[in-house]
Image (cartoon, rainbow, N blue to C red):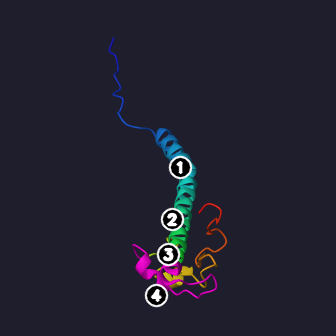
Amino acid sequence: MMKNRTARQRGFTLVEIMIVVAIIGLLASIAVPNFVKARTTAQMNACISNLRQIDGAIQQWALDTKQGDTATVTAADILPYLKNSVVCPSGGKTFADSYSISTVATPPACLKVPSTHKIDQTVQ
């Protein structure tokens, strides 16, 4: 008796490939929102840190120049007290389009995302 040998082709079937693609798609659908959330949180934390740095610079300027709480402060006044150029990580290009400052007593505010970027005065 002669045996017919059928050579099985090595490789993946369409079903196996579709299962792998489905698993990769599922993992990506879980990972992408977490990545976006982490990026947003990092930007928010960086902006809050910038606001604290700006407020510290305003207070240092006021002490050095003997200004009161109602004194008007400008970006040019405090830029020497800032180590680096400070811009909002949520899309700011310059200090002027990222943050607003007015008086020594008024905390600085973020112009890009004002509702979520605030400094907590009790933490300082």
Q: Secondary structure at mark 1?
A: helix
Mark 1 or 2: the one toward you: 2
- Residue 14's x, y, as percent? 47, 42
On the image, numbered disc 3 is attached to which residue? Answer: 60
* Numbered mark located on residue 76 in the image: 4
Q: Earlier in the sequence, mark 1 or mark 4?
A: 1
Amino acid at circle 1: Gly
Residue type for callout 3: Gln
Earlier in the chain: of badge 4 and badge 3, it is 3
Mark 2 in CB contact with mark 3 (< 8 angstroms): no
> Mark 4 or mark 3, which is nearer to you?
3
- Residue at mark 2 to residue at mark 4: CA–CA distance: 22 Å
Q: Looking at the image, which residue is at 52% across and 71% down?
A: 56
Of callouts 1 and 3, the N-terminal one: 1
Q: Amino acid at mark 2?
A: Ala
The residue indicated by pointer 1 is: 25
Can you give x and y, in whole percent of width and height, for residue 83 in the image? 40, 72
Q: CA distance from mark 1 to mark 2?
A: 32 Å
Label 1 Cα neighbours within 10 Å, binned few <14 / some 14-19 / many ≥20: few
